[in-house]
Amino acid sequence: MNKNSSNIMALAPSTSNRRETVCIFGTGDFGRALGHKMIQSGYPVVFGSRSTQISSLIPKGAEVLSHAEAAQKAAVIIIAIQRQNYNFLTPLTEILHGKVLVDVSNNLKINEYPESNAEYLAQLVPGAKVVKAFNTVSAWALQSGTLDASRQVFVCGDDTEAKQIVMNIVRALGLTPLDQGSLLAAQEIENYPLQLFPMWKFPILLSFGLAAFFFFYCLIRNVIYPYVYENKDFSFFIAISIPNRICPILALTLLALVYLPGVLAAIIQLYRGTKYCRFPDWLDKWMLCRKQLGLVALAFASLHVLYTLVIPIRSFVKWRMSSQIISQVLNNKTEPLDTTNAWLSDSYLALGILGFFLFVLLGITSLPSVSNNVNWREFRFVQSKLGYLTLILCTAHTLVYGGKRFLNPSSYRWARQNWNNLWCSMVSSLSCPLRLRSTCTYTYPHRSTCTRA
Amino acid sequence: MNKNSSNIMALAPSTSNRRETVCIFGTGDFGRALGHKMIQSGYPVVFGSRSTQISSLIPKGAEVLSHAEAAQKAAVIIIAIQRQNYNFLTPLTEILHGKVLVDVSNNLKINEYPESNAEYLAQLVPGAKVVKAFNTVSAWALQSGTLDASRQVFVCGDDTEAKQIVMNIVRALGLTPLDQGSLLAAQEIENYPLQLFPMWKFPILLSFGLAAFFFFYCLIRNVIYPYVYENKDFSFFIAISIPNRICPILALTLLALVYLPGVLAAIIQLYRGTKYCRFPDWLDKWMLCRKQLGLVALAFASLHVLYTLVIPIRSFVKWRMSSQIISQVLNNKTEPLDTTNAWLSDSYLALGILGFFLFVLLGITSLPSVSNNVNWREFRFVQSKLGYLTLILCTAHTLVYGGKRFLNPSSYRWARQNWNNLWCSMVSSLSCPLRLRSTCTYTYPHRSTCTRA
Amino acid sequence: MNKNSSNIMALAPSTSNRRETVCIFGTGDFGRALGHKMIQSGYPVVFGSRSTQISSLIPKGAEVLSHAEAAQKAAVIIIAIQRQNYNFLTPLTEILHGKVLVDVSNNLKINEYPESNAEYLAQLVPGAKVVKAFNTVSAWALQSGTLDASRQVFVCGDDTEAKQIVMNIVRALGLTPLDQGSLLAAQEIENYPLQLFPMWKFPILLSFGLAAFFFFYCLIRNVIYPYVYENKDFSFFIAISIPNRICPILALTLLALVYLPGVLAAIIQLYRGTKYCRFPDWLDKWMLCRKQLGLVALAFASLHVLYTLVIPIRSFVKWRMSSQIISQVLNNKTEPLDTTNAWLSDSYLALGILGFFLFVLLGITSLPSVSNNVNWREFRFVQSKLGYLTLILCTAHTLVYGGKRFLNPSSYRWARQNWNNLWCSMVSSLSCPLRLRSTCTYTYPHRSTCTRA
């Protein structure tokens, strides 16, 4: 342990309670915001600047000196300038020897430079102890004190004591330092604030694509078809009925996509005869976004639940029920209880409830604070056993609901006749005078007649 | 690094696995509980006390000595006595030199003394290494082992090695040490256990005030008005109908209050022409409790969803529906499907569902473990973009539901006539014999006639 | 601080950015997986093995040497072999002096050996610095990069610098090191991955037992009884109606069991006259699983809410409603609004909603990341005050719903006659020819007559 380190130790608030002076190079937005916050937290602050005139923007109580003078006043120097201007530090190498240099810079693009800004700084000023910190904090949030988001400050550096000093400053500002190890971690820390949900992109794009496809499918099947053939306006189905068909389809599809790669991986392993071989890239990427796929599936499942639960409040449903009852009364016939129907209806609802319940449980266990509290064995148990049970329950829910109709030709009736009919109807609609309804006979070539609506 | 520190290093469990003796000054509740727990965890414990008689309350296996003798037996001394009695330590300064003193004390009020208890202790015994710890742990919980709450122990101190030793003890007791930096943090650590949801006070008071106002408004409008004028008893509206009007109003109001200060701040910044200027105090405080405002809004929105979903199960609603159907049958008329109405009903429900869904998403991202895992850019994206989208969807939900009635005079009919009529009705009710109903003509002065109910 | 430690300091990536060589003893699954991951992260890896032939399974880029040669190439040696084979390290004691040995082993049973594997290793190789790490990480997850579960690596060891070096490696692999203190913590760390929800066993078994009991009770009461006596097939009640009776019963019972031990403990303390006395073991265990009991209760309450909200969608309920309306129409009588009934129905729903809302709030505050952010006083406030309020609201919800029927003999009618009748009916059913219905007179001995159904 050389002399410098014991010098630095003396800077740590050990004997007196006064905080040690901090020097900030650069009087830009971030430098001023950080200086402001530090003065508030009791640190004497010295700015190092090219022009030593005190501007009105400099926080009150801060001194402004030349870079060399400012650097001599403090053991910790925060480099709040752009990487492109780091060159000006080279002449100061002598003065900066043994000092703690805090690199707070960010880049505009991920991996913009071959080495991280902090490592570049360490190369420029070899005698200094470079620590990366504060780059994930917003200047505006620092200044206004509204740190709603993460208070975490990632700190990395090769000198343990320099890191400790910076971490103490971080804590004094009311933030939480997270030791990320040596300066090699700087690259990752610099990339971090540039990301925007990198793992979520694929699941969200996939689900939007699928949602758009099923939306148009349902639109044609449930709105356009009855409008064209039966002249009924069910356009309001767009609000609830169609979303409530898309959501469960997507939820089940995405949930299946969560568990499919595991099965594929097992098949590949069996085929290759070894467990420790790299999977193909697409499978790797797929496996890495399984959690996100599952959470998107859960989102669609939750929407499905909400859409289903409001069914009895819908004006259309109330109207349909009352017209059914009225028609029963007027026809003077009362339907007996259909036990098979009651069984089907109840069991499909019960399966859906249990499936959704387990799905929510899976979602809760994937919260970081919960999954950090379970060990690997417990996590496997929940995500694998409970996951497959959820998939089975949700599939059973779908089968009981729609199984009968699945291979029933009447569900696909329109498919055979669809384009045929659509064409026929459109032609005949256009060829009929207004207020007359066209009837289309399904022969080829189409013959259409116009009747009074 | 002086000789003492290397002495202390030797105390850390490095070569042998035996735990080092810990001394506890004070045999009060907390001292005994801590001693008990330490003996359970394998630490030899020595109590330092004025009277060295072993009371039945002292945990079995602990020695009780005079303060001076006890201090000499251990390198770590826990000061489990009141701040008022710290003076007795002054004569022991010589013995305590180089020892680790752990201050576990709490105050009764926030910022009761100018300096924290730990800093006061460090001033009294200058040669000792003071570490603040254990003050957030309950004696009872320690003793009974029922640590349901946070297992976090905040530790701060100026000597890194002393802090490490105390943190190892904390871990050995099954608790999680959190390094809070230098002894300057002691003030905050001492204030911490005295707080009771300080950020929640304003949002909760505000929402209670608004809830009370809207409750009485709705009570007069929906219960008292029909009772007085139409002699209908709708008092059961108090249970669900009225709360289900208050909840959405409050949810939307509070959600708007979350995003209003940001807009105000932007206006102030534009007006002042600078981004880095302190906001007025009221705006600052408002901005700091936005998260809490949002969560209270989410609570009201969730209640609104539950109150809405139970509508079809309500006995009153079932009765109303069946009487509507019966009256349709008896009048022999069937209503056709009102497509506009179906559109309105479905789109208002769909907007509500999507708004609530995004609102829950916002709530989940504000969980500490989730918001710690997103960076500033991601947090801004969620809280700002998704937040405004939520606000827009919820406002649209309200407008589609109530827009038509918003400026419809019939909604305010009673407002013009209200006090007039109320007065008239009350007077005439009182002036009519029992079992006769009063009719009131809306002239001035009121003339009332009594008719058979 | 001896010379070795400064040697080790030199290994930390301080001057150059190249990562230091890591040696792995053992070429089994875990050793290879770890080596693979380390090479990916930029570490030169040397395997120490009995046979120095490079197998195809060894990750590309790794060297394979004899144990002695490999150990000399690195300052950090990962011991990826079984505890039973640790003996072979004894001859290497000289070479391993001052090296950092990382114990990654796990046992098959909890507390399989008297001392932890890491402590055993430290005894075998006295000069080495043993650090326990990586044992909670799955080899497969390391290899395939799919670390969905916890990325936490528990690290413990007596030498602070050795621990720092290992923690830096952990971070470089993209994992989160958690310092667990001295090597004494190794026992707990080794037991950790063998647990499978130890605290959840009792609550889940208890709730399954109670659920089974109430299921058969309801099955007999609501399905078998009407089938036998009234020849009605209500078997579809098994899907929703019966679960929706079991869930609220269990939720309320388990919630009461959360708060009962606190009351019992208070009584015991009053009786014993002291607050600081160990509770009986059963009470201790009960108190320790209160959180889990509460969460299981919340799960049942959530299921109850879902089962209740789907009621109006159920085919049976729709049929019952329409047949009630039709019978009213046919009998030409309209029921007036029953205000008492409306009050009961609404207030029972409102109490349930509020109770469930508070229950969910309790559940959210018990999330680790939330409960870590509240202090002891706040936690007590939420869990005790809000908890009791929840219990009161839920009990009131039950009383308003079922209070009238609670001591109504008609609810228990079948109880008096049950076995009597069941016997009678079964006998007479069997004795009647098919297609004839038996009537049973409730005298003793039973007389049954057969009538046309």
Image (cartoon, coloured by chain):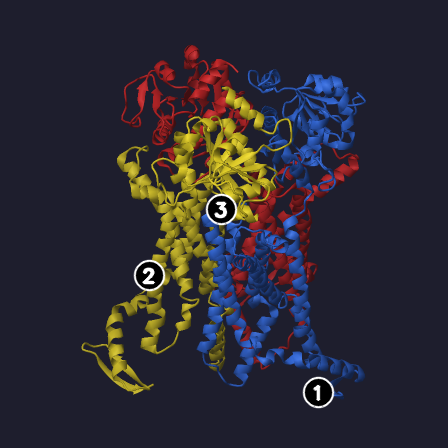
Chain colours: A red, B yellow, C blue
Which residue carries the number 1 mark? C442
Q: Do marks 1 and 3 both belong to one polypeptide chain?
A: no
- Is residue C442 found left or right of B22 in the rendered image? right
Disc number for residue B25: none
In this rendering, the answer to whether B442 lies above or below A191 is below
Q: Position of residue A434 (x, y in %)?
A: 47, 63
Which chain does the numbered disc 2 sit on?
A: B
Residue at 64% in and 77% down: A336
Which chain does the numbered disc 3 sit on?
A: B
Q: Position of residue B50 (x, y in %)?
A: 46, 39
B328 or C378: nearer the viewer: C378
Q: Which class describes the residues within 10 Å of circle 2: few (<14), some (14-19), or many (20+)?
A: few
Residue type, numbered disc 2: Phe
Which residue carries the number 3 mark? B29
In this rendering, the answer to whether A330 lies above or below C354 is below
How many angstroms separate mark 2 from mark 1 (CA)? 62 Å
Closer to viewer: mark 1 or mark 3: 3
